[in-house]
Amino acid sequence: MVIQMLEWTGERIIPKQLKPTNGMLLEHIARYYFATPYIKGRVLDIACGTGYGSHMVAKERKRELTELIAVDNDDDTIYYANREYNHQKIIYQKEDALDPDLPEKLGMFDTILSFETIEHVADDQRFMDNLYQMLKPGGMLILSSPFGRGRGMPTSEPFHVHQLTPAEFEELFVRFRETEIYYQRGVTFEKPRDGVRYFIGVAVCTK
């Protein structure tokens, strides 16, 4: 019953229900592998979904991280993550990414992961404010989002509020001390090349 509900809520990957060669699954896993070298200290995975990615980086970086807080806004998803991807260093909990009190509730982090989340929220600036407040000075944010027609414009994806343009995506990170933008193509991450169309941006930011 929980798994059926997860399918209905949309865009939450359930690896155990998908073929290993499923393209969307591979893309999601690739983002967590890409982020793995940056994982250290106290970590936040915001909109963690079913928890497979949080579990993966916790196992890979168990010596480098002290605690991983994995949050999602759906009760059934958190229940599933706790059941299927439990780990001694992970705490799964239900939270709203736009809650103005979120920084006070969760505290400060050395590393924040936010994959395929910002396109789901109506107020992307509030979302970014929360992330910035929760990141320690010198901490790192790794954030990804699909590109589209732009803020406030309709999208063909039923669960997306909007999809930012590449320029709007880069503007999200102007207050960070350093930002590197990569582009995801399948399971690879690269700097832009002439003649290649990219659908997903990935920012690595230092506060």
Image (spheres, grey):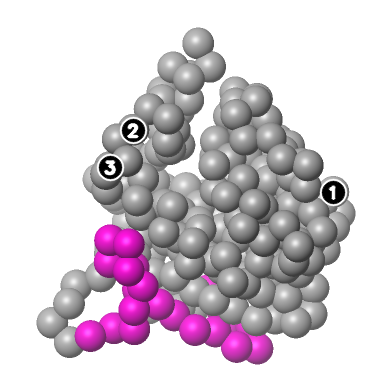
Mark positioned earlier in the residue sequence (3 or 1): 3
Amino acid tagged 2: Leu
- The span from disc 2 to disc 3 (Cα, nearest Å) is 6 Å
Q: Give the range drawn in magenta.
A: 172-193
Residue 81 lies in magenta, yes or no? no
Foreground of the two, 150 or 196: 196
Q: Which of marks 3 and 1 is in front?
A: 3
Q: How much space separates mark 3 and mark 1, taking CA atoms?
A: 36 Å
Determine the CA span between mark 1 and mark 2: 34 Å
The x and y percentages for residue 17 are 38, 27
Place of residue 61 in the rendered image (x, y in percent of width and height, measured from the top left): 67, 61
Q: In which quarter of the image is residue 90?
A: top right
Mark drawn on residue 22: 3
Find disc 1 in the rendering and name its residue.
105
Q: Is mark 2 on a helix, strand or loop?
A: loop
From the viewer's perspective, is 153 left or right of 194?
right
Give SS at disc 3. loop
Tell me if label 2 and label 3 are in contact, CB under 8 Å: yes
Residue identified by numbered label 2: 18
Q: Which amino acid does label 3 sit on?
A: Asn
